[in-house]
Image: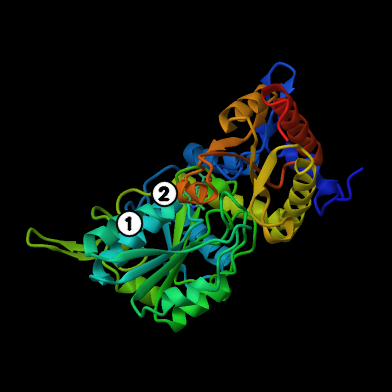
């Protein structure tokens, strides 16, 4: 008997909720049902989202902000309606603070290039953390290289928390212009104390960017209480289709930033001598946007509201506490990151004597989808001295029975590959 409970705020609704996700009833092979534990890579989509996007293409597909015809007006209205929904979802003050992008990666690149190229100078510093996803490292390294700026890192402790004693010392240089960090680590699950970090950055005269790719699907975001100047998220991790993401930016900052990409839709007037640019948000949305994706994102936000982010968080917390307790009993298994109370619903681990890819392949054989590798966080894996790990990530539709199957199969793999490991 485990000491951790097998109930959560969603226990009574789980069967009905799972029925909303058509893919969850699929079998990987005849008789082997899907156990989807890879939602941190991308979540599955409820019928409501699939239908909303399909409805757009079936009923009123048209380009936005261009035509005067009926469908173009309907498409524009749906697209701009999605923007208002995102504004409310993240607590932004103004709809023009919401820029649609392809994903969180593009949102971060937009800030790194548009803000960074205009505002960084030789010797300036950008502070990141050792637990960042490559999406929040590489763009800064590229732009820092172009401008002669330096990238510095807040270290992490062995338990997978940010080292908050070192952070103020990094700010003391007086050269820090940007502090950019993940709200929740995609490898450790650590929920970072963002408000505390942004407050210190602000006091040191630096701007902040929050990578909310792993938090937007799970916790109620409020850009004001987070103290974020910029925030990036990806729709596909929060029940929406792929190809739609969001950059939030404070209006006063976005208004004075030069464009990122040039082309149609983002201009005021183009002559052969030069171009003047449109206002917000169009200035940062060059070309035809992903209208169907925005419609799907809007439906996803409605779905998340319907279930309730608090209930989702409570459910994931119950799952992760249960999973970590059970996994801890497997000899040779090492989990990375803080205890369940300080993390969201994902856990990365290694098993002594078993290559993460072999483990993931054996899990897949039993229908269990997990991610194996460096999870686009190589510096973090270097820090722990492992090239790769296995990650199981949970979402609102996962069950305690699925956790049991994960744990049983991991133990089976250990006995097969490394029977004498301790
Ligand atoms: N992490 C994972 O399996 P995109 O690819 O742009 O939608 O998201 C990038 C990204 C940025 N920040 C964090 C913290 C992330 O976790 C991700 C995406 C996926 O962990 C795919 S690599």
Secondary structure of residue under mark 2: loop
Mark 1 Cβ inside 8 Å of ligand 1: no
Q: Quadrant of the C terminus?
A: top right
2 and 1 marks in contact (CB < 8 Å): no
What secondary structure is found at the residue carrying circle 1?
helix
Residue 414 in the image: above or below residue 245: above
Q: Residue at x 66, y 38 (%)?
A: 37
Judge from the rendering whether residue 404 lies leftward or rightward of residue 105; answer left or right: right
Where does the image place residue 369, in percent across and percent down from the top left?
Answer: 63, 32
Which quarter of the picture shows residue 128?
A: bottom left
Image quarter of residue 123:
bottom left
Q: Is residue 215 above or below residue 102?
A: below
Q: Is residue 291 above or below residue 412?
A: below
Tell me: 371 left or right of 117. Answer: right
Residue 208: horizontal and vertical position, in percent? 44, 70
Residue 107 position within the rendered picture, expressed as x and y whole percent measured from the top left: 40, 56
The residue labelled by disc 2 is 102
> From the image, which quarter does the N terminus lie in?
top right
**Who comes first in sequence, dot 2 or dot 1?**
2
Residue shown at the point (62%, 53%) measured from the top left = 189
Q: Is mark 2 within 8 Å of ligand 1?
A: yes
> Which of 365 and 217 lies nearest the eye of the viewer?
365
Residue underneath mark 1: 141
User: Residue 120: x, y in percent?
Assistant: 27, 70
Count numbered badges in the picture.
2
- Circle 2 residues within 10 Å: few <14, some 14–19, many ≥20: many
Structural crowding at the residue carrying mark 1, measured as other residues with C-alpha within 10 Å and reported as few (<14), some (14–19) or many (≥20) = some
Separation of residues labelled 2 and 1 (CA atoms): 21 Å
Q: Is residue 412 visible?
A: yes
Work out which residue is located at the far bottom of the displayed protein and give it. Answer: 203
């Amino acid at each position: 008997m485990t000491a951790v409970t097998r109930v959560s705020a969603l226990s009574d609704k789980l069967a009905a909720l799972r029925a909303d996700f058509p893919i969850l009833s699929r079998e990987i092979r005849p008789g082997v049902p899907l156990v989807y534990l890879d939602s941190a890579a991308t979540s599955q989509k409820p019928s409501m989202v699939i239908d909303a996007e399909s409805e757009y293409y079936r009923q009123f597909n048209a380009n936005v902000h261009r035509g005067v015809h009926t469908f173009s007006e309907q498409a524009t209205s749906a697209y701009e309606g999605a923007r208002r929904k995102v504004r409310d979802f993240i607590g932004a003050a103004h709809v023009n603070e919401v820029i649609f992008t392809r994903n969180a990666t593009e949102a971060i690149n937009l800030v790194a290039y548009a803000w960074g190229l205009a505002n960084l100078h030789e010797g300036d510093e950008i502070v990141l953390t050792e637990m960042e996803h490559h999406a929040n490292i590489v763009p800064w390294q590229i732009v820092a290289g172009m401008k002669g700026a330096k990238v510095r890192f807040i270290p992490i402790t062995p338990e997978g928390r940010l080292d908050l004693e070192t952070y103020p010392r990094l700010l003391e240089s007086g050269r820090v212009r940007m502090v950019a960090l993940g709200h929740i680590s995609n490898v450790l699950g650590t929920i970072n104390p963002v408000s505390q970090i942004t407050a210190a950055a602000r006091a040191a005269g630096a701007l902040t960017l929050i990578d909310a790719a792993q938090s937007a699907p799970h916790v109620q975001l409020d850009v004001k209480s987070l103290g974020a100047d910029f925030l990036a998220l990806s729709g596909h991790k929060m029940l929406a289709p792929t190809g739609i993401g969001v950059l939030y930016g404070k209006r006063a900052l976005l208004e004075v930033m030069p464009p990122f990409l040039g082309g149609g839709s983002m201009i005021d007037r183009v002559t052969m001598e030069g171009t003047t640019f449109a206002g917000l948000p169009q200035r940062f949305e060059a070309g035809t946007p992903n209208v169907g994706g925005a419609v799907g994102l809007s439906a996803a936000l409605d779905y998340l509201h319907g279930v309730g982010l608090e209930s989702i968080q409570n459910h994931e917390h119950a799952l992760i506490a249960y999973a970590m307790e059970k996994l801890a009993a497997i000899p040779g298994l090492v989990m990375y990151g803080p205890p369940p109370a300080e993390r969201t619903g994902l856990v990365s681990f290694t098993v002594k004597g078993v290559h993460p890819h072999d483990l993931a392949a054996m899990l897949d054989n039993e229908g269990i989808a997990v991610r194996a590798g460096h999870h686009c966080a190589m510096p973090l894996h270097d820090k722990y001295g492992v090239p790769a790990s296995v990650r199981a990530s949970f979402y609102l539709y996962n069950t305690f029975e699925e956790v049991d199957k994960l744990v049983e199969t991991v133990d089976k793999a250990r006995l097969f590959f490394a029977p004498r490991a301790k």
